[in-house]
Amino acid sequence: PPPGLRNQARRLRGRLPAPVTVWTSAVDGRRDGWTISSVLVADGEPAELVALIDEDCDWWPLFRETRLATINVLGPGQGWVSDVFARLAPSPGGPFRTGTWADDPHGPRLEGAAAWAAVRLIDAEPPHAGWGLLVRSVIERIDFAEDVPPLRHQDGHYR
């Protein structure tokens, strides 16, 4: 639609730089993940990661079950991984065929990412915020790839 008829909140969100993360969980040989850009780090003791999550996404039931996830902060050149886990791009054989993944107790870790955070879900029945679920998780571990800058998404492009 023309700019005047577009959703104004979505247009505002598009103008704000957003992190590009893939949240992953695994249990008993099952693993899944989802791209999430509505993420906020809340410093404190303990620190938390807060995210807006689509309750209809494929990954949410697995996260609710395990209560564990690895947040993969994507790096340069990993926009394709983001698109695959958002279910916007194909990945024959499943999303974990895109990129190289290592097992972690909290969920698969993407090699070449800028950072990883291991989190534990606080409430499996979170409230809604807009159309998403306002999900809070405690950060249990953080690892950085010091030489890899984080990928961001703005105005419909990865930067």
Image (spheres, grey):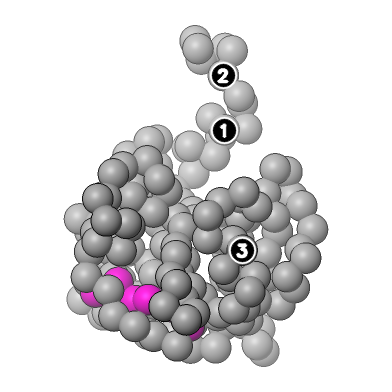
Secondary structure state at the residue bearing disc 2: loop
Residue shown at the point (65%, 70%) measured from the top left: 64
Q: Give the crowd class for mark 1: few <14, some 14-19, many >=20 residues within 10 Å.
A: few
Mark 3 or mark 2: whose residue is earlier in sequence: 2
User: Which stretch appears magenta?
Assistant: 106-111
Query: What percent of the width, then of the height, locates residue 139?
Result: 56, 82
The mark tally for this picture is 3
Query: What percent of the width, then of the height, locates residue 78?
Result: 25, 57
55 versus 28 height, above or below:
above
Secondary structure state at the residue bearing disc 1: helix
137 versus 57 height, above or below:
below
Query: What percent of the width, then of the height, locates residue 150?
Result: 32, 64
Q: CA distance from mark 3 to mark 1?
A: 26 Å
Main SS type for the magenta part? loop
The disc labelled 3 sits on which kind of residue?
Answer: Pro
Q: Give the crowd class for mark 2: few <14, some 14-19, many >=20 residues within 10 Å.
A: few
The disc labelled 2 sits on which kind of residue?
Answer: Arg
70 or 93, which is in the foreground? 93
Q: Residue at label 2?
A: 6
Q: Residue at label 1?
A: 10
Query: What percent of the width, then of the height, locates residue 121?
Result: 65, 76
Q: Is residue 118 visible?
A: yes
Secondary structure state at the residue bearing disc 3: helix
Q: Residue at label 3?
A: 61
Q: Is residue 70 visible?
A: no
Residues tagged 3 and 2 counted as in contact (Cβ below 8 A): no
